[in-house]
Image (spheres, rainbow, N blue to C red):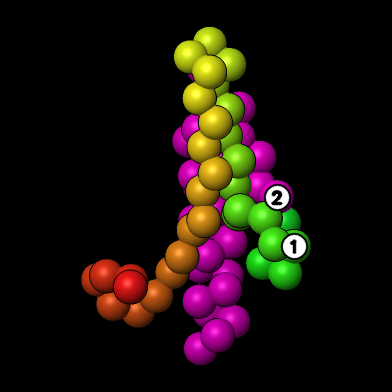
Amino acid sequence: MGNIRRSRGYSYEYLIVNRLNNKYWTAKRLGGSSVGLPDIVAVNNNKGILLAIEAKSGTGDALY
């Protein structure tokens, strides 16, 4: 079950990165969970916005 959740998490991270990469945003996935960094970093240089995203997956409708 852990590997299924992990693969879902990676897939969702790539989905977020692909959706954010456009004319206004640049997003990068930073690597594994043991790095101590957020999963995804996105920047919008035009508006001066930096996002640090920690993606989670689970089996329920909400994560606490």
At label 2, the amino acid type is Leu
Main SS, magenta residues: helix
Pair 1/2: label in front? 1
In the rendered image, the vertical position of residue 47 relative to residue 41, given as above or below:
above
Residue at 43% across, 69% down: 57
SS category of the residue bearing label 2 = loop
Could one spot residue 61 in this view of the protein?
A: yes
Could you tell me if the residues under marks 1 and 2 are in contact, i.e. CB atoms within 8 Å?
A: yes
Residue 32 % position (x, y): 71, 64
Residue type, numbered disc 1: Val
Residue holding disc 2: 30
The answer to whether residue 18 shows anywhere in this view is no
Inspect the magenta stretch and tell me whether residue 62 lies in it.
no
Q: Position of residue 48 (x, y in %)?
A: 53, 18
- Work out which quarter of the rendered image holds the C terminus and state it: bottom left
Badge 1: residue crowd in 10 Å (few <14, some 14–19, many ≥20): few
Q: Residues within 10 Å of mark 2 (few under 14, many from 20)?
A: few
Residue at the image point whose x is 57% and y is 70% from the top: 7
- How far apart are the alpha carbons under marks 1 and 2? 8 Å
Q: Give the magenta range.
A: 1-30
Vertical position of residue 19 compared to residue 29: above or below: above
Instruction: Name, please, the residue furthest toward the top.
Output: 46
Q: Between disc 1 and disc 2, whose residue precedes?
A: 2
Q: In x, y percent, where is residue 29?
A: 66, 47
Residue 59 screen position, x and y as percent: 35, 79
Identify the residue under disc 1: 35
- Secondary structure of the residue carrying numbered label 1: helix
Camera-side residue of 56 and 6: 56
Report if residue 8 lies within the magenta region.
yes
